[in-house]
Structure formats: structure tokens, C-alpha cells
């Protein structure tokens, strides 16, 4: 947000700058340049055909449903809902205590056509780590997922959306694009499924990326209502790669609606 500051208001300028700095610190996100889904689609990947994707998101009202920090005890029920509703999702998985504990669920996600992505090994804030620490958090989950599915992820989501040049560089080396979001229910703070549903519906928009967690009690029960009501609004659910097609998520790049 630009500040309107007169030349004579140096003390005011200093105060406002301090407030802006504090606001950035509390927001949970480091400074970054992001690419929108529309911009990604306007730069087709080499060899990509315009009609290769199952949905043309330049024409359809696309939205991507994503889930962080699983799999967990409610993920099987979530997968049942997605299968029944014929909705693909993108799962940003945690390695320790999740991927390694629930390999059958990871295999099921892959088998049923969902996109499997990386959400680090232990959910550490990557901007607090040096390059070796970032690499360990990401590469251990890459290896664990590849061992189960036979394929390494190409997408990752930094915990709390915190990223910086070091995170970008390591992600690029590992072949991982960074995916942020445009709608979140803050479902870690409530078990009220109706509230979770309402928060998502209020924030939903074309080319949106919805962030939910399949590890919290109120979330999975909210998903059927979210899907049905967004379908009634004319939305088509896609995975994140489908949202960007015929563009391709470039390693290291941050994508955000």
C-alpha cells in the first residue's frame, strides 16, 4: 500500500515506515516477486500444446483446492469426498510423521490423480535456516515421496508462506516451484466447519488457490459444502499444474494469484 507523505513530514514518514516494517514482520511472509496463474499461462512451456490440459483456464472459471501438512487420520475421508465429487486436489505433504506414517494414503492420492507436492520434512520456517538446512527439509520429503510414488514432486509450499532468496535458490536446485495461496480459512484456529466454509466462500475467486489443512478436525467436514457451492457459482476445480497450463511451474519461482 503506498503512503502519501509530504516532504516536510519527516517524523511522520519515519513513524509510518516503522509501522510498515512491523506489519511486514507480523504478516508471516518475506519479500518476494510472484507470478500469477494468468501470467504463467501466457508463457507456454516449450513443446506444450494449447489444448493439452484437460481444462482451459483462460476460458473456464478455474480454482485450485490445496491441502497442507498431511496426510492424517481424516485424509481417507477427504479422498472419498474428492472421488465422489470428481475434484482433483493438490496435496502439500509433510515428510516426518505424515508421509512416512501413511504411505498407503500417499499412493492413493497418486493413483486417484491428485498432485502430490512438498511441504518440508518438519514444517520449520525455511527463512530461519541456512541453505543446507533448507535443502535437508525439502530433499528428505522429496526422497520419501519418490520412494512411495516413483516420482519426485515439482511443487513446494514454504511453511507460513515464508520465502527468500536462499529458499528460492535451493528450490530451484531441487526442481521445485513455490506455490502460495489466495484464500485461507485459518482452519488451524477453529473447529467450526461452517465458519471454515464461509471463510473460503468469501475469499474464492477465479484463478484462486485455496489453502486448507486435512489434519484439523473442522476442515474435512467443511469440504463437501465448499465444493458444492463453488460448483454452483460456476467454478471448475483443477490441480495447481492444470491452473498454470500450458505454462509450467518453473523451479524456484513463486506463484500466487
Image: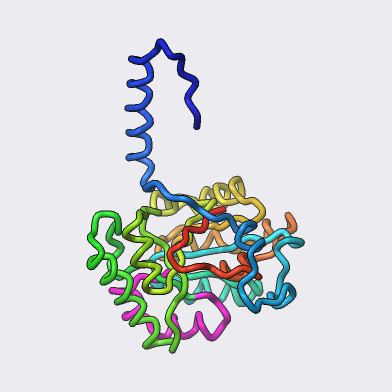
Q: Residue at x 50, y 80 (%)?
A: 109
Q: Position of residue 196 (x, y in %)?
A: 51, 51
Q: Quadrant of residue 178?
A: bottom left
Query: What is the quadrant of residue 174 in the picture?
Result: bottom left
Q: Position of residue 11 (x, y in %)?
A: 33, 15
Give the image location of residue 98, x and y in percent. Answer: 34, 74
Q: Residue at x 37, y 72 (%)?
A: 173
Asked where in the image residue 13 lies, by quadrant, the reply is: top left
Q: Is residue 161 left or right of residue 65?
A: left
Along the line of sight, the residue nearer the viewer: 204 or 244 = 244
Q: Where is 12 relative to 133, above or below?
A: above
Residue 98 located within the stretch drawn in magenta: yes
What color scheme is it?
rainbow
Q: Against 72, is 5 above or below?
A: above
Q: Could you tell me which residue is drawn at 70 percent across and 75 percent down? A: 54
Residue 1 place in picture, x, y as percent:
50, 32
* Stretch in magenta: 92-115
Image position of 55 with respect to 179: above or below: below
- Judge from the rendering whether residue 116 lies leftward or rightward of residue 22; answer left or right: right
* Observer-nearest of 1 and 215: 1
Q: Is residue 201 magenta?
A: no
Q: Is residue 208 left or right of residue 149?
A: right
**Which residue is at 64% across, 51% downward?**
205
In this rendering, the count of numbered labels is 0
176 horizontally vs 193: left or right: left
> Which residue lies most toward the top here?
8
Amino acid at each position: 500500500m503506498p503512503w502519501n507523505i509530504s516532504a516536510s513530514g519527516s517524523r511522520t514518514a519515519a513513524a509510518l515506515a516503522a509501522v510498515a516494517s512491523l506489519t511486514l514482520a507480523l504478516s508471516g511472509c518475506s519479500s518476494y516477486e510472484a507470478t500469477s496463474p494468468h501470467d504463467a499461462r501466457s508463457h507456454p512451456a516449450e513443446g506444450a500444446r494449447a489444448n493439452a490440459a484437460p481444462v482451459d483456464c483462460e476460458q473456464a472459471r478455474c480454482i485450485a483446492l490445496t491441502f497442507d501438512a498431511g496426510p492424517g487420520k481424516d485424509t481417507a475421508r477427504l479422498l472419498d469426498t474428492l472421488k465422489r465429487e470428481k475434484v482433483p486436489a493438490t496435496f502439500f505433504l509433510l515428510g516426518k510423521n505424515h508421509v512416512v506414517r501413511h504411505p498407503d494414503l500417499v499412493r492413493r492420492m497418486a493413483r486417484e490423480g491428485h498432485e502430490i507436492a512438498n511441504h518440508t520434512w518438519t514444517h520449520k520456517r525455511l527463512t530461519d535456516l541456512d541453505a543446507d538446512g533448507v535443502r535437508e527439509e525439502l530433499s528428505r520429503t522429496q526422497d520419501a515421496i519418490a520412494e512411495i510414488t516413483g516420482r519426485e514432486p515439482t511443487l513446494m509450499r514454504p511453511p507460513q508462506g515464508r520465502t527468500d532468496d536462499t529458499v528460492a535458490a535451493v528450490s530451484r536446485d531441487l526442481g521445485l516451484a513455490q506455490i502460495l495461496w489466495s484464500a485461507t480459512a485459518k482452519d488451524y484456529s477453529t473447529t467450526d466447519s461452517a465458519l471454515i466454509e464461509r471463510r473460503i466462500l468469501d475469499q474464492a475467486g477465479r484463478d484462486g488457490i485455496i489453502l486448507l489443512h486435512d489434519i484439523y478436525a473442522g476442515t474435512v467436514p467443511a469440504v463437501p459444502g465448499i465444493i458444492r457451492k463453488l460448483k454452483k457459482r460456476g467454478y471448475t476445480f483443477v490441480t495447481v499444474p492444470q491452473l498454470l497450463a500450458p505454462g509450467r511451474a518453473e523451479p524456484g519461482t513463486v506463484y500466487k494469484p
